[in-house]
Amino acid sequence: MNADELKQLSIEGCELIGRGAHASVYRIAPDEIVKVYREDIPYERVLTEKRRAKRAFILGVPTAISFDIVKVGKCFGAVYELLDAEPTDSFVNRSAGNLEDFIGMSVELLRYIHSLDADTSDCADMKADHFKWVDNTEHLTGAHTADVIRGIIEGVPDSNKLLHGDFHLKNIIIVNGKPMMIDMDTLSYGDPVFDLATITNSYLTFPQMAPEAATVQLGISVENAYHIWKRTLSLYYDGMSREELAGIEYKARILGLIRILDFVQRSVPPDLRDMLTGQSISMLNELIGSGTEV
């Protein structure tokens, strides 16, 4: 269907149940939700995500597949039929037991995703993207920092395994007590450390940069965000020593920060961009200067 032929859908008065970097999710009926993309996201990208979601579903990844594409004002939206869907932050905030259950389920899901071979013709090469982000931001970080980060990227093993690319609780909803992905736009391939880098951004780096904004965005406390990261790291790499885990966190944080630094240059308003750029560079300098976890 041509984008001009899509029907209009109103979300006035609808409950917001999730929000990621690229879209927000609203409940429009007891058994239906709509994912509303940012205004700058084109129709072709919405169709790409739908195609990737179908492929991931066939591979056994629990993911929602839209049955209709609509317009919501000037934005595109994808409509899904989901029974008993609950925002993950609501599930997590209900009890300490639910928090631990979510961490365990999400790590199990993450490991399963990473066990799958990616279709490299339809996914981004995350290692190549990181090299590109270093090149794009070298004028901000300086040559020394850029070279250190390139060395870290070069040391990451090549891999064709599937990555989610933006794995955090706002891209997951709880359906019948189980996690289901609602954002497959960022599917990519590479070593798991690249997914761990995006997780540090969500649960560690972002809350450190802007704790109040992170609390609103994630829907959970900063303390719970930190806890999710630490438990995710230790469960994913079960059996590793504290020193080994610190080394992985060090790499993940640096890789995550260079992604943030590149993103804010392209997608953040100038006033906020300057603040986040300064914070990102400061954190990178502190990490690289110490050579250990901050």
Image (cartoon, rainbow, N blue to C red):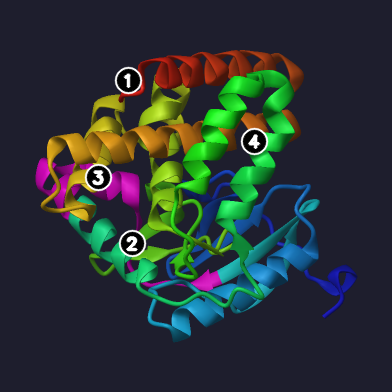
Q: Amino acid at mark 3?
A: Leu
Residue 118 forms part of the magenta stretch = no
- First along the sequence among labels 4 and 3: 4
The amino acid at mark 4 is Val
Q: Quadrant of residue 86?
A: bottom left
Tag in front: 2 or 4: 4
Q: Give the residue at mark 1.
A: 294
x and y, in percent, of residue 200 in the image: 39, 37
Residue 249, image quadrant: top left
Q: Per the image, is 81 magenta?
A: yes
Q: CA distance from mark 2 to mark 1?
A: 25 Å
Up-down relation of residue 10 to residue 291 (above or below): below
> Foreground mark, 4 or 3?
4
Tag 4's secondary structure? helix
Range shown magenta: 80-101
Cα distance between the residues tagged 1 and 4 = 21 Å
Quadrant into which the C terminus falls:
top left
- Which badge, 2 or 3, comes first in the chain's sequence? 2
Comparing 74 with 269, the one in front is 269
Q: Nearer the viewer, mark 1 or mark 4?
A: 4
In the rendering, at what x and y percent does residue 149 appear? 53, 33
Q: CA distance from mark 2 to mark 3?
A: 11 Å
Name the residue beneath numbered marker 2. Answer: 110
Q: Can you identify the residue that label 4 sits on?
A: 134
**Residue at image location 81% in from the left, 51% down from the top:** 74
Question: On the image, numbered disc 3 is attached to which residue?
Answer: 233
